[in-house]
Image: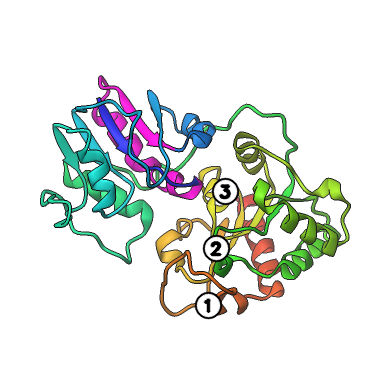
Amino acid sequence: MILVLRALGVGDLATAVPALRGLRAAFPGETLSLAAPAWLTPLISAIGGIDRTVAAAELEPLTGAPANPQIAVNLHGSGPESHRRLQALHPAKLWAFASRPAGHADGPGWHDDEHEVQRWCRLIRYYGVPCDPEDLDLDVPPADVPRGVTIIHPGAKSPARRWPPERFASVARRLSSAGHRVLITGSAAEHELCVRVSDAAGFDRSAVARTDLGELAALVAGARLLVSGDTGIAHLATAYRTPSVVLFGPVSPRRWGPPPDRPWHRAIWHGTRSERGDLPGPVHPALLAVNEDEVLTAADEVCRAAAAQ
C-alpha cells in the first residue's frame, strides 16, 4: 500500500499529477491510495491509476486511511503538520521533505521559490522514483457540455488574486463582439460574482454556467479559450492544452504558472517578487496593473498559436 497525501484544491492536485504518475509507474503491483477531498473525485479519476481515494480535509486527521502503509508520501506541504498526519498511521517509510519539528530528517530541503510541479517531482526523485514534469495531461470526464466556448472565470480563493469584475466584464463583452461564445464560470460560492460579470458585460443569465467539477473539466477540455486569474481552472487549461490567459497578482507564475514553453498559454504578471497567494484584503497591485487591452492581445496570440499547432 502506497498512501499519498494531497488534501488541497484543484490546482494543487493538477500540479501533483506528474509525481502521482511517477509513483504509479514505480509501484505497479501496489495499491496506490490518495488522501484528498471527496469532491475532487472526478479529477482524481481523470488522472488514472489511483486505486483508492481516502476522503481527507486539509487540516483534519486521516481517520479513514489504512494504518501501516508501506510508504506514506507527503505531497501536501513542508510539514510539520502534514508529516504528523502521516506519521500517526505508522508507515514503514515516510517520503517527505526534511522537517526538524516533525523529527523527519530523511528528505530533501524545501525551496520556497520552486515551481509546484517541479517541487513534487524533485521529492520523489530524491527517493529514486523517475518523474516527468511534462506529464500533466488529464482524461476528459464524460459530460454533456458545449464545445468551442470561451470561458471567463472571475473568481479566485483570495481577494488579492481576483481581477476586478468590471475588467472581466469588459474582456467578455469585447470577446463576444469578436465572435466568441462566452460563458462565465465559478464555484457555487462565486455565483453572484459571475452574475455581476455577466450583467456588466450585457449578457443574459444563460451566460452563467452552473457546473460540477467533472462538467467544468470537460468544458475546459473542449473550450476555445480560457481567461482567468491564478486559480484551479487555469491548471485544467494546462492539463487539456486549452489556450489560456492567466492573470497573476501576489504569486509569480514561476511558481504556479503554465509551462513557459507552450505558446498557447500566456501568464501575465507585473509583480517583482512572489508573495503568499492567500493574502486577505484588496486586489494585489500587480494584478491591478493588468489592463484589458493586454489581456485581449494575449487572447488573440494564444488562439493563433493553438491554431498553428
Residue 199 located within the stretch drawn in magenta? no
Label 1 with label 3: CB-CB less than 8 Å: no
Residue corresponding to mark 1 = 270
Q: Which mark is residue 158?
A: 2
Closest to the observer, 14 or 298: 14
Residue at the spot 45% in from the left edge and 56% down from the top edge: 259
Q: At label 1, which amino acid type do we have?
A: His
Part of the protein shown in magenta: 10-36
Residue 86: image quadrant is top left
Which tag is nearer the camera, tag 1 or tag 2? 2
Element marked by disc 2: loop
Cα distance in 3D space between marks 1 and 3: 22 Å
Measuring from the top left, give residue 12's x and y in whole percent: 43, 49
Tell me: 198 left or right of 283.
Answer: right
Q: Which residue is mark 3?
A: 237
Considering depth in this image, is 58 or 151 the residue closer to the camera? 58
| Structural crowding at the residue carrying mark 1, measured as other residues with C-alpha within 10 Å and reported as few (<14), some (14–19) or many (≥20) | some
Determine if residue 129 is in view: no
Judged left or right of residue 306, residue 64 is left
Q: Please tell me which residue is depicted at 63% across the width and 58% down the height of the picture.
A: 155
Q: Is residue 61 above or below residue 172?
A: above
Residue 230 in the image, given as x and y percentages of width and height: 54, 60
Q: Closer to the N terminus: mark 1 or mark 2?
A: 2
Badge 3 density bin: few <14, some 14–19, many ≥20, Cα 10 Å: many
Q: Is residue 118 visible?
A: yes
Q: Amino acid at mark 2?
A: Ser
Determine whether, in the image, residue 20 is placed left or right of residue 39: left
